[in-house]
Amino acid sequence: MEFTAAEIAEFLKGEITGDPEIKVNTIAKIEEGQEGAISFLANPKYEHYIYTTGSSVVLVNRDFVPSAPVDATLIRVSNAYESFASLMTLVDQSKPKKKGIHPSAIIEKSARIGKDVYIGALAYIGENCVIGDNCRIYPQTYIGDNTKVGDDCLIYPGVKIYHECVIGNKCTIHAGSVIGSDGFGFAPQSETEFMKIPQLGNVILEDHVEIGANVAIDRATMGSTVIRRGVKLDNLIQIGHNVEIGENTVMAGQTGVAGSTKIGKNCMFAGQVGIAGHLKIADNTRIGAKAGVAGDIKDENQVVTGLPAIDHRTFLRSSVIFRKLPELKAKIDYLEQELEFLKRNMI
């Protein structure tokens, strides 16, 4: 890629301070800037880098006022972070896309393949599958029988999508993820034996869902495990059978959600959150890292933390007490000794 500052400003609807004809051909963090690179400044704690960066162009917020001279050309935009993300999307879309079907790919005769699809080496497309237009399916992907994949999907190497699942439009599934494996359903037959319960449902990913690497989403026992529109899952996440995740909810890595839990829309889960089964989590819930949720969260817009998860502000007050437990224990021991001494002397 190579763009002038003027071209970038026009695309981002920004205002230039500096040389509009300066050219950039790469992207860099502001602290690692070099000639020909474009960077951005959104967080004030990184401001000191703008006075020393080697980047040729830096995106800044419109209200940014430098406290020292800046050598780089500035492009002022409404939101530097969002504008930089838009620019990175433009760069990504300008890269050449893989096309065609590799001769080693196996596509069953009953499968229907859309237009302008890429299917990589050793990929398998099962019977009666439907693959939408403009999809890119990378090598060693498995797509089971009767599965439907929408338009403009990106499925990275080694993804396994079991039979009869439904993938919406513009979804991304990263390497190693498994969609539609059996839910963890076993009925106890004795103290030492369990009978497997057939998992007859499927998984539905709605449009604009992104699944990270090595994520497992279990198929439903009956019905569907549903990941609603716009959900973003980080790497190494486990979603149990019959779970429903509401629109635009995001989850960080190593989160686990047990079966039949219903999660609302616009929720945010930090890393290593654990959610018990058969719960309901209200819309706009925020859950802190390593929290364990054992009961329903009924009210919207709550922020919870801890194990078991409680209101975040209560958790912070409690953590202050927890840190002081050794001191409190010493005081209690001292008071007990004093009380015992007073008892002995009163007799």
Image (tube, rainbow, N blue to C red):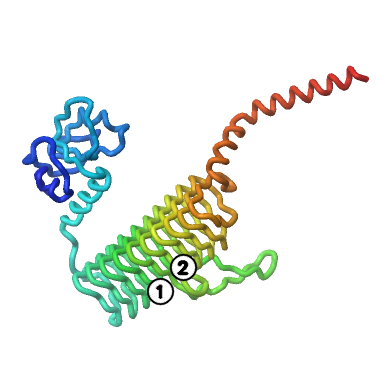
- Observer-nearest residue: 340 or 11? 11
Q: Where is residue 73 in the image (x, y as percent from the top left)?
A: 13, 36
Instruction: Kindly identify the residue that appears in the image at 27 percent across and 44 percent down.
Output: 81
- Quadrant for the C terminus, please: top right
Q: In this view, does 287 lie to the left or right of 72?
A: right
What type is the residue that disc 2 sits on?
Thr
Looking at the rendered structure, the secondary structure element under dot 1 is loop
- Which of pointers 1 and 2 indicates the residue nearer the eye? 2
- Observer-nearest residue: 347 or 290? 347
Res. 158 image quadrant: bottom left
Label drawn at residue 225? 2
Q: Position of residue 344 (x, y in %)?
A: 89, 20
Vertical comparison of 281 with 19: above or below: below
Q: Distance between the residues labelled 1 and 2?
A: 14 Å
Looking at the rendered structure, the secondary structure element under dot 2 is strand
**Residue lying farthest top?**
345
Q: Where is residue 261 in the image (x, y as percent from the top left)?
A: 53, 62
> Looking at the image, is mark 1 or mark 2 earlier in the sequence?
1
Res. 245 image quadrant: bottom left
User: How many numbered marks, from 0 up?
Assistant: 2
What type is the residue that disc 1 sits on?
His
Label drawn at residue 163? 1
Instruction: Kindly identify the residue that appears in the image at 27 percent across and 72 percent down.
Output: 132
Crowding near pointer 2: few (<14 within 10 Å), some, many (20+)? many
Q: Is residue 318 left or right of residue 70?
A: right
Q: Position of residue 124 (x, y in %)?
A: 31, 71
